[in-house]
Image (cartoon, grey):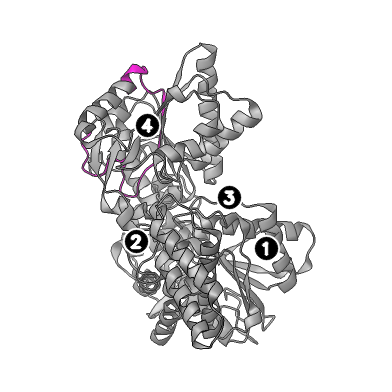
Amino acid sequence: MLESFEKIPVQIYQNPTEGSNAVAAQIATLIKEKQAKKQPCVLGMATGTTPILLYKELVRLHKEEGLSFKNVVTINLDEYYPIEKSAYQSYWSFMHRHLFDLVDIDPKNIHLPNGEWTKENLKESCIAYEQTIEKTGGIDLQILGIGKNGHIGFNEPGSSFHSKTRVIHLDQQTRIANTYEFHDLNKVPKLAITVGISSIMKAKKIVLLAWGDKASIVAKSIEGDVTEQIPASVLQNHDDCTFVIDQLASLDLTRNNAPWLTGSNDWTPHMIKRAVISLALKLDKTVLSLTADDYKENSLSDLLVLKESVYDINLQVFYMLRDTITGWPGGKPNAIIPAHPERSAPHPKNVLLFSPHPDDDIISMGGTFMRLQEQGHNVHVAYQTSGNIAVTDEFVTRFLDFAVGFEDLFGIDNKKSQEILTNARKFLADKKTSHLDTAEIRAIKGLIRRCEAKATCRYVGLKDENHHFLDLPFYETGTIDKKPMSEVDIRITMDLLKELKPHQIYCAGDLADPHGTHKVCLEIIFESMRRLKADGENWVKDCWVWLYKGAWQEWDVTEIEMAVPMSPDQVLKKRFGIFIHQSQKDSVPFQGTDSREFWQRAEIRNANTADLYARLGLTKYAAIEAFVRWHY
């Protein structure tokens, strides 16, 4: 039955690491087969965040298992234009940093479009690159990523299926998505060189990788019509193409989004909830107003066999939705509410709120944060990273100016601060996009964010001793690329957990963060809790972990297990709390594809969740913050 929906073979893995390792093993097998035949292995290579784990595993296979790349020839898909090879953001630098410099590939076998090609010879250079591909005998295995608009390589929507290597004008959505590499949208090149769609389609085998928040475009590419408006959809016409994706990227496939349509479905209470909510939203009806005909006409007649009446099904789902809503996120004291999301006792609870960056607490769950504090719980906040790379250079000189002026105002010797200011101005005046900030400037940027976080905690009402700055080492690279989590990161987190012994933990389950910090922070918490449980820490078995989403997306309404409503006044109070983070206001260095400010995203997201509940027949609130519980 899946075949009628999925027009491209799909392999779904639990996470990007498992998927990447599987593809790396496939590549290693192909390289060895070619070696045995004394033939070159021609690999088409992709860039961006998607293939980083793939390249990491290939490097491991080389260093630990002896995989040689001496017979490998690489053809890269694309490059920004114009850009110097030496620039940190160039794909030439990317490939050497993540793969080429770490394996035994012959430099003569490496082929990339050149961001330094002269404008006068661009067309001829593109033709020559196309000829280079042909001279290799064709690509044996092409690795692809996919943009949220469906681009492959830099073939943006509207690209001809007959296109070859050429210069292309980048879609604004693509430039915004890649801002994280350049810190400033104005510095993202507007042009790029890309291998064309027809050239990609000539590859003998294609593997497209997609992780995280790519679910919508993945489903359209696999199950929708072939159209130049979604370039990746053309892969339906390839004889040997596979999509390798993780669980998050698979969520909008029919097999996951509406499995009852595939003909094989286990009607668990959760699946019933999903089906009924999906039907109600599709028909724009409240849950309690759905009829037997609605079920029959929308492939849900099987549900009618399970219950005596349609109203019984509707009522079951209505109660499931109703019971997620609570104004008492820490549990209502001295009350027995069997279906309440949280326990009534103990009260007050020790609550630990993990915030990956120094503003995720107020942005993602500010209303709940304030309510927990107001309801008398012992609330602590742990800021996991310094967030120092997400501060613009202008803020550094602004605050140094203040420091110098403050000391001058009160007759304090400002010789040292004036020296730091002078050095910072000189460095920033000559700074290029490929330059890392100095240790001093990174420290200042971290201090700016720390002060904003402290001010937010005071605004909410926390005592000064209840905020903790972990400054996890994995983050402190000074670049977008972060280290994997380490034993030091885990030990720092475990020590805080053992000190506080929380009854409740809140942490970011939002894996759509464009530069991956949330994901690593979450993995550190999960690993810490697993180890503490294995070590026999008694408090762990009574600790509930709640996951919130960040600034980029919200939980699906069918997944929400605790919904905390907010009044109009609470929405405004949360907004003013977000405003305290002035370094993140107006111009956000790493905002992904969404150009709105964080307070706007948060309010619209929370209002949309409240609207969904109202559409389904529940009470209409101004806003709702949503959570899902993690069981370990």
Label 3 to label 1: alpha-carbon separation: 16 Å
The spot of residue 87 in percent (x, y) is 40, 44
Q: Can you tell which mark lies on residue 483?
A: 3
The secondary element bearing badge 3 is classed as loop
Badge 3 crowding class, 10 Å Cα cut-off, few under 14, some 14 to 19, many 20 or more, is few
> Which quadrant of the view contains residue 440?
bottom right
Q: Can you tell which mark lies on residue 594?
A: 2
Badge 2 crowding class, 10 Å Cα cut-off, few under 14, some 14 to 19, many 20 or more, is some
Q: What type is the residue that disc 3 sits on?
A: Lys
Q: Can you tell which mark lies on residue 112?
A: 4
Disc on the earlier residue, 1 or 4 = 4
Identify the residue under disc 1: 493
Disc on the earlier residue, 4 or 2 = 4
The spot of residue 161 in percent (x, y) is 23, 33
The secondary element bearing badge 4 is classed as loop
- Report whether residue 205 is seen: yes
Say if 255 sits above or below 617 in the image.
above
Q: Which residues are magenta?
A: 133-161
Towards the viewer: 258 or 157: 157
Badge 1 crowding class, 10 Å Cα cut-off, few under 14, some 14 to 19, many 20 or more, is many
The secondary element bearing badge 2 is classed as loop
Disc on the earlier residue, 3 or 2 = 3
Disc on the earlier residue, 3 or 1 = 3
